[in-house]
Image (spheres, rainbow, N blue to C red):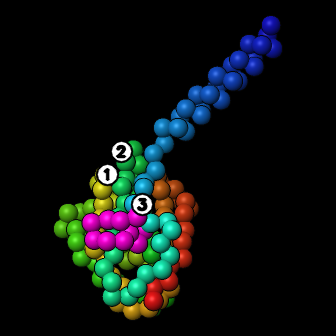
């Protein structure tokens, strides 16, 4: 009888942990944003310099998002709400890396465009992660 009680206790404990994990919400990256194709969409790996793109994420209640863009000799311009509505905070890490943080939950979007061809890496840090939860290489032609 004790064995059944122990097994039931373990099963209930595992079920509770599973339910806790089901309540974790992650940011979403739509295919399109307010300014066009979303550069953050996980399947978007090729961009064209000079074209306008969205830099869009939906960050649900209880989650957060930091993005690091890194590479050599890349340059971009940011328009839209960055710096005006405070949906993104930009911090220069070094000459070729920038940290972008979503500062409000909900929709964050900005208009961006790259000025010339380059290769970059976008690292996604979701929900306070200390290491990137996603990473993608992007070629700007």
Kindly check if marks 1 and 2 are in contact, taking CB atoms under 8 A apart as contact. Answer: yes
Mark 3–mark 1 distance (CA, rounded to whole Å): 14 Å
Q: Secondary structure at mark 2?
A: loop
Q: Is 57 on the left or on the right of 125, as rendered?
A: left
Q: Which mark is residue 25?
A: none
Q: Residue at x 48, y 38 (%)?
A: 23
Contact (Cβ within 8 Å) of mark 2 with mark 3? no
34 and 94: which is toward the camera: 34
Give the quarter of the image for residue 69.
bottom left
Residue lying at 40% horizontally and 85% vertically, measured from the top left: 48
The boundaries of the magenta stretch are: 31-40
Which mark is on residue 29? 3
Between discs 2 and 3, the one toward the N terminus: 3
Q: Count residues near mark 1 (Cα–Cα under 10 Å), then give few for <14, some for 14-19, many for 20+.
A: some
Question: Label 1, on which residue?
Answer: 105
Can you identify the residue that label 2 sits on?
61
- Label 2 crowding class (10 Å Cα cut-off): few <14, some 14-19, many 20+? few
Q: Is residue 29 left or right of residue 1?
A: left
Q: Position of residue 74 (x, y in %)?
A: 42, 87
């Amino acid at each position: 009888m004790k064995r059944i009680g122990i097994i039931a206790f373990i099963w209930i404990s595992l079920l509770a942990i599973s339910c806790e994990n089901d309540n974790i919400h992650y940011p979403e990256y739509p295919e399109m944003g307010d300014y066009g194709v979303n550069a953050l969409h996980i399947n978007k790996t090729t961009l064209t310099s000079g074209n306008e793109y969205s830099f869009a994420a939906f960050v649900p209640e209880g989650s957060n998002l930091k993005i690091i863009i890194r590479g050599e000799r890349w340059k971009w311009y940011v328009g839209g709400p960055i710096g005006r509505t405070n949906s993104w905070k930009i911090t220069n890490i070094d000459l070729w890396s920038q940290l972008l943080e979503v500062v409000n939950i909900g929709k964050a979007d900005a208009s961006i465009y790259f000025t010339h061809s380059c290769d970059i890496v976008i690292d996604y840090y979701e929900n306070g992660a200390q290491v990137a939860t996603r990473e993608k290489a992007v070629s700007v032609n």
